[in-house]
Image: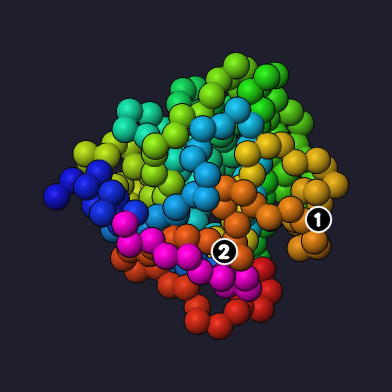
Amino acid sequence: MSVHLILWLSVMLVTQHYLYGKAFIFQKKTATSYVLLSPDLPLSLQAFTLCMKVASVLPINREIILFAYRTKDYDELNVWQEFNGTFSLYLSGPGVYFTLPTLNTFGSHMCVTWESKSGLTAFWVNGKRSLRKVLRPGHRIQPEGTVILGQDPDSFLDSFDEAQSFVGEISDLYMWDCVLSPSIIQNVYLDHSFLKGNIFDWKSLSYKCTGNVIVPSKPLTGM
């Protein structure tokens, strides 16, 4: 059975959960463990803000996939930590790279913003913005794809590569179809009151775990 068919069937089984205070825990590198996310709106985007908390102690000299959105033919939106420790954003083509603090066992709050009109994109780590770079001005992210945490689907027809899999914890994932203001991103980081994520919202997230992914039954402390 192809990965495409498996993921399509999985979409049918996605249910909505309240995850506040919890996390997706990926225990070890594997080619079979991932989380499938179902967006509340189609990912037909000319702008976005993506935020999440990430903790990992994987070595720097290893690719780490943090977020993957793929349509049938393209990696529409991928966020990586690269071999050399830089972080990258790809939008169905060449990416841009940022030098940021590396992932660690205590966890980092990370946001990525992009808007099509200017192509301006930036990373935010623990409430602080990186310099801005330009990526694909005039581009539109296409809908009808699949969002996966934990694996990089290079193709719907091929299996995953455990050497690129995520190991660690991901939590507090939110996504909006606009670029949030700096003050709102600060509120997200500090867990103050902020606008509900209209694409993904951690407090009402539709997802399905496959393989060796743990979601604690009770809220965690810290991170």
Residue 105 showing in the rendered view: no
Q: Crowdedness of circle 2 by 10 Å Cα count: few (<14), some, many (20+)?
A: some
Image coords of residue 119 (percent x, y): 66, 21
Q: What stretch is highlighted in magenta?
A: 12-22
**Residue appearing at x 72%, y 44% in the figure:** 124
For marks 2 and 1 on the same chain, the one whose residue lies earlier in the sequence: 1
**Residue appearing at x 29%, y 50% in the figure:** 7
Relative placement, left or right, of 25 versus 45 is left
Image coords of residue 171 (percent x, y): 58, 63
Relative placement, left or right, of 147 versus 186 is left
Which is more toward the observer, 164 or 185? 185
Q: Which residue lies furthest to the left in this view?
A: 1
Which is more toward the observer, 166 or 120? 120
Q: Crowdedness of circle 1 by 10 Å Cα count: few (<14), some, many (20+)?
A: some
Relative placement, left or right, of 11 versus 147 is left
Mark number, residue 187? 1
